[in-house]
Amino acid sequence: MLVLVCSTCQDSTKEYVCELCLKNGKQCCEISVKQDCQAEPELSEPSDIGKLSISNKISTSKAPGSNGSEQLKKLRILCLHGFRQNSSNFKGRTSSLAKKLKHIAELVFIDAPHELSFVYQPHPDVCSDKPSPPSGTAKTKFAWLVSPNMSCHTMQDWKVADAPFDPLQYQEQTDGFKESYAYLESIIAQDSNFDGVLGFSQGAAMAALLCRQQQKTCGSPKFRFGIFCSGYPAPVGDFDREPIRLPSLHCFGGGEGHDRQIASRASTELAGMFEEGRCTIIEHDMGHIIPTRPPYIDRMKEFLCNFI
């Protein structure tokens, strides 16, 4: 039991009695109080109690759980959504992933800085000069990279797309990197406790650009690992061919994966930008998504456990 004694009481008496002992009529024992200037006596450690090891690495520190057991501190992962998405949309789409990783990782979602206009593609069966826009309230969508001729503004009215949506439009999205990089650096400066970065589609391309720019300016990326899902190498920036020195996991639809938006060869090319010895590739057959069923989720967990 810890007893707090003021200096006045300490000087007036050297005997302190437990109230429970006094109430139950037990014998009072004298407790001596050590002066602040005295050296604390050395205590022998019981043989059945091991020493507590404390790591100075935040990502591997342990905190006591509510039931008295020790729990590993979760990895914090910065998550970058794809083109024409937003943080809430991406969070909803990855809810299954977050559930599967809930014991080892915390996913943090943010919006990209480039706000996109509301555009839609009319149904081919609709014959009208002014087709009706989608019903319901639209949520603002964002991008990390945009095409040079794309207008990014805050208009809340729908407009018809100038041309059919092109699955290869990502190859033309070459503007906006400087703004997105500065924005992400400000996020990291405010919260430096991110262990890794995860990107999906254009978010994966931006995550790779971020790590490559950090390596160019700072000597190395500021993350301990990166996860790149359905990614591709964006034709942005003036970088050398030096591999990105970062443990990386690349998850994408393989040759039979039927990813209709990002070809598997593009994702393979992105993986080739990272150090080969620390690059893990997971190919699946589920299209343009982040798979959460075995064995894919098991390999992702195995990768993340290397950093706990």
Image (cartoon, rainbow, N blue to C red):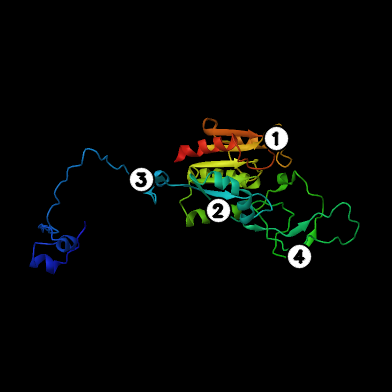
| Three-letter code for the amino acid on which mark 3 is drawn | Asn
> How many labels, in total?
4
Contact (Cβ within 8 Å) of mark 3 with mark 4: no
Q: CA distance from mark 2 to mark 1?
A: 31 Å
Label 1 belongs to which residue? 257
* N-terminal-most mark, 3 or 4: 3
Name the quadrant containing residue 160.
bottom right
Q: Earlier in the sequence, mark 2 or mark 4?
A: 4
Q: Nearer the viewer, mark 2 or mark 1?
A: 1
Outermost residue toward the front in this view: 24
Whole-number angstrom distance, CA of label 2 to CA of label 4 = 29 Å
Amino acid type of the residue that numbered disc 2 sits on in the rendered structure: Leu
Which residue does the numbered mark 4 point to in the structure image? 157
Residue positioned 56% across, 47% down in the render: 98
Q: Is disc 4 surrounded by few (<14), some (14 to 19) or many (20+) residues within 10 Å?
A: few
**Element at label 2:** helix
Secondary structure of the residue carrying tag 4 is loop
Closer to us: mark 2 or mark 4? 4
Give the residue type that dot 4 points to.
Asp
Residue at 55% x, 44% y is 100
Of the numbered discs 1 and 3, the one sitting upstream in the chain is 3
Residue beneath disc 3: 56
> What number is the disc on residue 184?
2
Of all residues, the one furthest to the bottom in this rendering is: 8
Sequence-first disc among 2 and 1: 2
Q: Quadrant of the N terminus?
A: bottom left
State how far apart marks 4 and 1 are (Cα): 36 Å
Query: Where in the figure is residue 220, as x and y percent of width and height?
Result: 49, 42
At which x and y percent is residue 177? 62, 51
Q: Residue at x 77, y 57 (%)?
A: 119
Q: Position of residue 73 (x, y in %)?
A: 43, 47
Residue 29 locus on image (x, y percent)? 10, 57
